[in-house]
Amino acid sequence: MYANSRIPTSAQTGIHERLPALLARHTATAFRKPYTGYNLAAFEASLARRERLAPKAPLIVDACCGAGESSIALARAFPEHYIIGVDQSGPRLARGKQNELPPNLDLVRADLADYWRLLRDAGIRLDRHYLLYPNPWPKIGHLIRRWHGHPVFPTVLELGGVIECRSNWRVYVEEFCFAVRYVTQREARCKPYVPDVALTPFERKYLDSGHALFRAEVDLT
């Protein structure tokens, strides 16, 4: 059945007790994992497309964009911006590319841990940045798999702009806010959120399943 999605369940009911120590380590030690060849090639090709099509347009990154429904919506909502939707799944992106894409949108297959660092290394700053319903990894032992627990998270914040995170698991967004405050000293708050129109397939399914949704937005300009 369609509207039968489950809310993430976890023994964890608040911010993970190990998150401060993890953030301290990640902010003190640079993440130097070698770039893979396919991520380098994907980044360079996407950068060349942007230079050809819209070199001066403000940039929006839609992280973990799946089949690109949210990226298409963002491209239409921000016609003066250039949107890059990034996902590591070739089949999902292939489905998205079957649609007629707006001219200010590029869908890129890449690992975000590399793509974000390559953006930073190229001196590129974002105008807006979306983390829409990432895998919450709700088990207590999975903290480092959540984006705010990953070594790349300080790099994500270095890219600047307005960053928005949404989830149907309140703890995920609260942890995201804690991590933003820890790294940048910028205020971020988790708030209940009901969109006028669902931006992603997950958001639509969660709404139709009766879930509460949570959102945080912070300006890192």
Image (tube, rainbow, N blue to C red):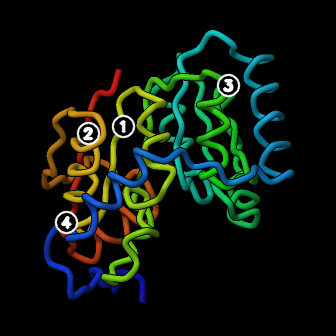
Disc 2 residue type?
Glu
Query: Is disc 3 surrounded by few (<14), some (14 to 19) or many (20+) residues within 10 Å?
Result: few
Disc 4 residue type?
Arg
Residue 9 is left or right of residue 33, and the answer is left
Which residue is identified by label 4?
A: 170
Residue 128 is left or right of residue 117, and the answer is left
CA gap, disc 1 to disc 4?
17 Å
CA gap, disc 4 to disc 2?
14 Å
- Picture quarter with the C terminus: top left
Q: Earlier in the sequence, mark 3 or mark 2?
A: 3
Residue at point 54%, 37% (across, down): 61
Frontmost residue, 87 versus 120: 120
Residue at point 73%, 23% (across, down): 50
Frontmost residue, 218 versus 197: 218
Mark number displayed over residue 122: 3
Q: For numbered disc 1, what is the local secondary structure?
A: strand
Which residue is identified by label 2?
A: 217
Quadrant of res 189: top left
Residue 91 is left or right of residue 156, and the answer is right
